[in-house]
Amino acid sequence: MRKREHLFLTFFIFLILSLLIVFLGRISWLEGLRGTLESLFNPLQNSILGIPKVPASIFINKELDRLAEENNRLTKLILDQKNLEKENQAFADQFSTTATVQLQLLPAKIIAMPSFVPGVSDPKYLIIDKGGKDDVVLNSAVIYKDNLLGKVTKVSINTSMVQIATDESSSFTAKTLGTNAIGIVSGNGGKESTFGNVLLSDKLEINDIVATSGEIEEEKVVFPAGLIVGKIVSVDKKSSELFQSAIVESSLNLAKLSTVFVVLGYK
Amino acid sequence: MKQAIALSALFLSAFVEGSILTIPITLSLLIVLFILESNNPVIFVLALLVGVLLDVLTLSGFGLHSLFFIIFILVAAMYEKKFEIKTPQFVFAASFVGGILYFATFHQGLYFFEIIAGSIFALFLFLFLLRFQKIKLQREM
């Protein structure tokens, strides 16, 4: 009985202590401590991240990897070509000009990539080694070689959390490069997303590239236009419904990434 | 010595969970440690420390993981009067329920496979440590 009383007393002491830590954390009194602990633990987090990559490399098919890389390179070339065509058209029309937009990018290392089976399953989110002190802000886009990776959902002093674009809670506007169909991309988890809310009058084609359309949220562009989301792998069109949709597959292999880029703004 | 080993194991599990794994192994480990060493108040110290570490690694609000762990352990302690808690069934059930509450609190979603994997991990860890404890007791006798 006495032991139980001792246990309850200890519980109340530590409950109050944790509530105090929560309160101090909310009023930002512990930011300095968090920053120090992050600097201390980030290298260890990063080295633990390297562990599943060693056995996972045994299962990597090098030829498949080379083809995937080549596929990404060709997708980027198609995107560049489409942008050039639009620019030429604008000059020919003499009604508008398309200014080439240069993004201000901050390279960031991935220090954590939690998943169900490390090195094999797709991660739910990423943690990068850049934070508030590097001018990273909430909702900053994160990209890799013109591919949209996700957006920053939490920012600390030294680190940030990145929500993957294919996560179930992710949603943004996009359009197809080939047919200019506009719709909303919603993550399905893993490598796939649904490109939905597309008007029946618009055309969706398999293998067409889906790219961001330059979404604005609270007067700030969240995802710059033209970032590759993925390729359409199947189309769901029923004349009895208001909209059509497609499944979009991302070609990014997240498990292989080590450095990504945070979009800080425009040059 | 025992507390130092427990703390090291908890810290290691927190780093693994914060870096590469979505399975709640830290919660499972805490539950098993509590059940094996029931009524030992040191478990609250361990919960507080590992909770703060997890908050830093997963960018959660400071103190939230500690608060969750401490409250959950107390709730599990209150069941000691009604049930025999040093059983595999209780360990599995506590880890399962704990996993559901954990993901609902910190991830706004139910990661079903992670919850099951965490419960199975807790179960096997409990059976292993219980056997280890029994062997040690037999040797002392």
Image (cartoon, helix red, strand yellow):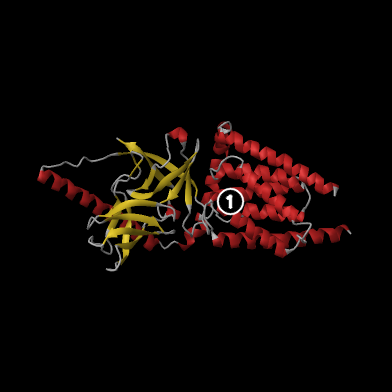
Residue farthest to the right?
B141
The answer to whether residue B65 is left or right of residue A234 is right
Provide residue A65's location: percent of width, then percent of height.
38, 59
Tell me if I can see residue A150 in this picture.
Answer: yes
The residue at the point 35 percent across, 55 percent down is A185
Element under disc 1: helix
Q: Quadrant of the C terminus of chain B?
A: bottom right
Q: Chain of mark 1?
A: B
**Eyeballing the image, is B140 above or below B61?**
below
Q: Quadrant of residue B76?
A: bottom right
Provide residue B70's location: percent of width, then percent of height.
68, 47
The answer to whether residue A129 is left or right of residue A33 is left
Tell me if I can see residue B8 in this picture.
Answer: no
Provide residue A174's location: percent of width, then percent of height.
30, 52
For the residue marked with disc 1, what is the amino acid? Val
**Eyeballing the image, is A39 above or below B100?**
above
The answer to whether residue A216 is left or right of residue A126 is left
| Residue matched to label 1 | B16
Provide residue A106's location: percent of width, then percent of height.
39, 39
The residue at the point 44 percent across, 53 percent down is A169
The residue at the point 31 percent across, 44 percent down is A224
